[in-house]
């Protein structure tokens, strides 16, 4: 009898302990940030493939420079290298999109992307300017853990900005490696709008994760954008003023 009672208490203890030590949504996001590859500067080369409703593909070569500005803020320069109709088109995003500029070489003009323009699609892709500039951290989203299984956590993220074009995000997070496998984006009416999926990652010796291939599908328009990385260089020397409007107007970076 005593052994039976002891067993009951042991089971209850393990159950309660499991609940106590289970990760919260906030802690999961913290761990995802900790697993993000740490760098001061980074150069990424790859390609973007646009796929329309009929399955027709258009391939664009691209290069992206990134700089860690601290406080979970990143500045980027993104440039198309080919084909000819988009060659040289360059995006500058400063500190997670606090300022966004677009350079169009055909017009030799720089456009400031501000306000509602940030929700526009970037050069025919399914990524908006905001999508390319920001992350999914606690500073921008309220997070709730909706469930978990043996392999994944399931989070719900609600944008803190009242003017966000998204009503909520449903995020699937790998339980072992702590990167998002999938994000479903819903509009403010609660309808599924876009789905972002990660298809290939590289785990480094320090446990950090690099995403090598992902796709974003606009469910409403039946159009998809695939991004594939061919090479990554980290901690490369860049001038202090590299991430500037002047730089994106240069013919070569």
Image (cartoon, rainbow, N blue to C red):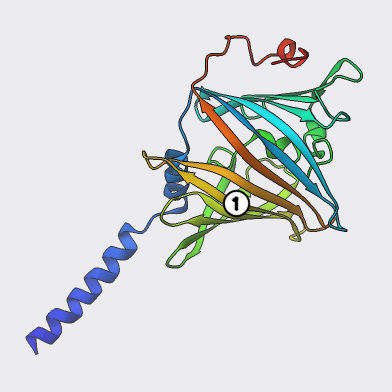
Q: Position of residue 126 (x, y in %)?
A: 77, 45
Quadrant of res 92: top right
Circle 1 residue:
198
Q: Position of residue 17 (x, y in %)?
A: 27, 64
Relative to 119, 29 lies left or right: left
Q: Is the C terminus in the top left, top right, bottom left or bottom right quadrant?
A: top right
Q: Nearer the viewer, residue 101 or 11?
A: 101
Q: Nearer the viewer, residue 34 or 140?
A: 34
Q: Nearer the viewer, residue 236 or 156?
A: 236
Q: Residues within 10 Å of mark 1 (few under 14, many from 20)?
A: some
Relative to 171, 151 lies left or right: left
Q: Is the N terminus in the top left, top right, bottom left or bottom right quadrant?
A: bottom left
In the image, residue 242 above or below residue 139: above
Query: For the residue labelled by badge 1, is the local secondary structure a helix, a strand or a loop?
Result: strand
Query: Furthest residue to the left?
Result: 2
Q: Position of residue 130 (x, y in %)?
A: 71, 36
Q: Position of residue 109 (x, y in %)?
A: 87, 16
Residue under the image location 51 percent in, 30 percent down: 72
Marker count (numbered): 1
């Amino acid at each position: 009898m005593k052994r039976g009672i002891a067993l009951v208490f042991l089971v209850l203890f393990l159950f309660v302990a499991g609940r106590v030590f289970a990760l919260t949504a906030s802690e999961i996001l913290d761990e995802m940030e900790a697993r993000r590859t740490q760098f001061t500067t980074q150069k990424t080369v790859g390609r973007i493939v646009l796929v329309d409703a009929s399955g027709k593909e258009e391939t664009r070569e691209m290069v992206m420079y990134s700089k860690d500005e601290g406080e979970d803020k990143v500045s980027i320069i993104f440039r198309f290298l080919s084909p000819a109709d988009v060659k040289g088109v360059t995006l500058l995003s400063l500190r997670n999109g606090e300022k966004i500029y677009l350079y169009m070489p055909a017009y030799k003009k720089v456009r400031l992307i501000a306000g509602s323009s940030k929700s526009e699609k970037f050069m025919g892709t399914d990524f908006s300017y905001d999508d390319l500039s920001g992350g999914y951290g606690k500073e921008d989203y309220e997070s709730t853990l909706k469930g978990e299984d043996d392999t994944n956590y399931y989070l719900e993220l609600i944008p803190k900005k009242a003017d966000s074009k998204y009503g909520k995000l449903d995020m699937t997070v790998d339980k072992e490696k702590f990167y998002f496998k999938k994000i479903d984006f819903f509009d403010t009416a609660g309808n599924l709008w876009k789905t972002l999926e990660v298809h290939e990652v590289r785990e480094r010796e320090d446990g950090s994760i690099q995403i090598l291939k992902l796709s974003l599908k606009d469910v409403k328009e039946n159009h998809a954008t695939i991004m594939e990385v061919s090479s990554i260089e980290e901690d490369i020397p860049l001038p202090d003023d590299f991430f500037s409007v002047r730089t994106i107007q240069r013919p070569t970076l």
